[in-house]
Image (cartoon, grey):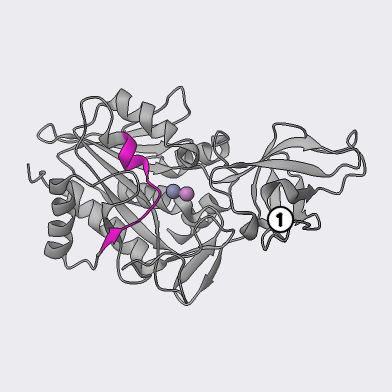
Amino acid sequence: MKETLRRLVETFGPSGHEQRVRALILRELAGSVDDVRTDALGNLIALKRGDGTGRRIMLAAHMDEIGVMVAYIDTKGFVRVHPIGGVSPLLEVGGRVLFDNGTVGVISYEKLTGGEQVPPMEKLFVDVGATSRDTCPVGVGDAACFLQPMVEAGGHWTAKAMDDRVGCAILIETARALLRTPHDCYFVFSTQEEVGTRGATTAAYGIAPEVGLAVDVTLSGDTPEPAVRMAVSLDAGPAIKVKDGGMLATAWVKEWMIDTAQAEGIPFQLEVLPGGTTDARAIQTTREGIPSGCLSIPCRYVHSPSETVSATDVAHAVKLLVAMLSRPLPR
Ligand code: CO
Ligand code: ZN
């Protein structure tokens, strides 16, 4: 599974540019699902059929990652960018970005004149080695993601795009490990989550599931003086979402997750995240409303080039999902 995750996180895929990730997932899923299709927004929808006695369950993990898009190139060939998703200039400066055509750029910033501690996005520029606008290897509208290899330290995995390729890896591994299920399980690898859960919105409408589950990262509160105080730590098990900035998990779906974890002896935590949301919100609020929950993977340094998760939390997440999908729903 680690090598699957490595391939996923090291692939280029800012929001709206998920094609390379989609092609990779298609290869990784071969032989594990009964049917695969891609919809108009680029969502990859893989179905594993049940035995006819179960329900229609949608699981979602997003393929896209945050990034930047070229907005303007100056006469000397320096590139100005706009954010794709929740990009913080603080976490960009000094980093490197990769464009779809293989061009690599370094992010730096102009002199700060307004007494700011952190450069605003307008002060950032990308140096792609060009000396003029005309010879610049990238153009307006081209997207880039961070450039960082995955590394391992003390049972933790660090990479760019762990949000949410770790969710994609967990869904792939769940599809592989789930040998028999009563349910029609729709594994949805969604697009454009980072710009407003857009892919999951149309996928959920199209599938019309009876239950929805997202798998995504959440923050952790276990680093020195964390910006957000929360009762979630790495290595303490996957987190069952109770609330985030965009949804309240449906009570019985949350209980289903908790009861299964307890029955299987799988460690878990409860997650109350003050801001942000996931594809679960999009599923929950589609059509006439779909009971939905979210399994979260605790992650340090979210939306930085070094998003960090625990290998054991990931393994426990797969175990929990397989157990949940192997049995009839509690209601
Ligand atoms: Co994100
Ligand atoms: Zn995410």
Q: Does the magenta stretch include residue 266?
A: no
Residue hosting label 1: 96
Question: In the drawing, does residue 272 fall left or right of residue 23?
Answer: left
Few, some or many residues within 10 Å of mark 1 (<14, 14–19, 20+): many
Give x and y (percent) for residue 284: 26, 36
Left or right: 250, with 72 as reference point:
left
In this view, 62 is above or below 35? below
State which quarter of the image contains the C terminus: top left
- The stretch in magenta equals 270-282
Tell whether 323 sits left or right of 306.
left
Looking at the image, the residue that sits furthest to the front is 114
Picture residue at 53% right of the left edge, 52% below the top: 161
Q: Residue 141: name its quadrant.
A: top right
At a point 31% along the width and 30% down the height, the residue shown is: 204
Q: Which of 238 and 175 is in front in this view?
A: 238
Q: Position of residue 73 (x, y in %)?
A: 82, 37
